[in-house]
Image: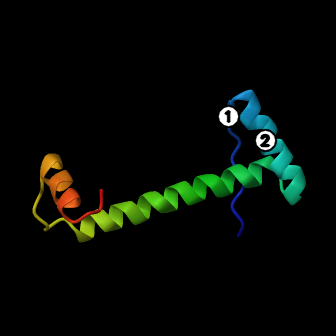
Amino acid sequence: MAMQAKRATVYFDPELHKALRLKAVETSRSVSELVNNAVKEALTEDVEDIAAFEERVGEPLIAYDEMVKRLRRDGRI
């Protein structure tokens, strides 16, 4: 059984809305479809970030200044 879409009011910056409408026309997709896909991608990234944090939970903490020193020492910055 397909889930029924829920309706929401979202306020976009006028220029962002214009760009969204143009992209919808260019890709033959609706603004709703573009927004739904963007939100799904953002939420998926959050899930991936949480999983990465959980994998590293046992690692020791390091101070920011110590990390900068290490990056400099290793030639990364």
Q: What's the coloring here?
A: rainbow
Viewer-side residue, 66 vs 40: 66
Residue in front for this viewpoint, 71 or 43: 71
Is disc 2 placed on a helix, strand or loop?
A: helix
Give coordinates of residue 75: x percent, y percent.
26, 63
Which residue position is annotated with label 2? 19
Tell whether 29 sits left or right of 33. right
The answer to whether residue 5 shows anywhere in this view is no
Task: Identify the element where label 1 is drawn.
Answer: loop
Which amino acid type is shown beneath numbered disc 1?
Answer: Val
Q: Is residue 55 left or right of residue 38?
A: left
Q: Earlier in the sequence, mark 2 or mark 1?
A: 1
Relative to residue 25, is residue 51 depicted above or below?
below
Q: Residue at x 79, y 47 (%)?
A: 31
Task: Give the residue type at disc 2.
Answer: Ala
Residue 34 image position (x, y, % from top left): 73, 53
Q: Quote the CA–CA distance across marks 2 and 1.
A: 15 Å
Q: Where is residue 77 in the image (x, y as percent from the top left)?
A: 30, 56
Q: Is residue 17 above or below residue 57?
A: above
Residue 62, image x, y percentages:
12, 55
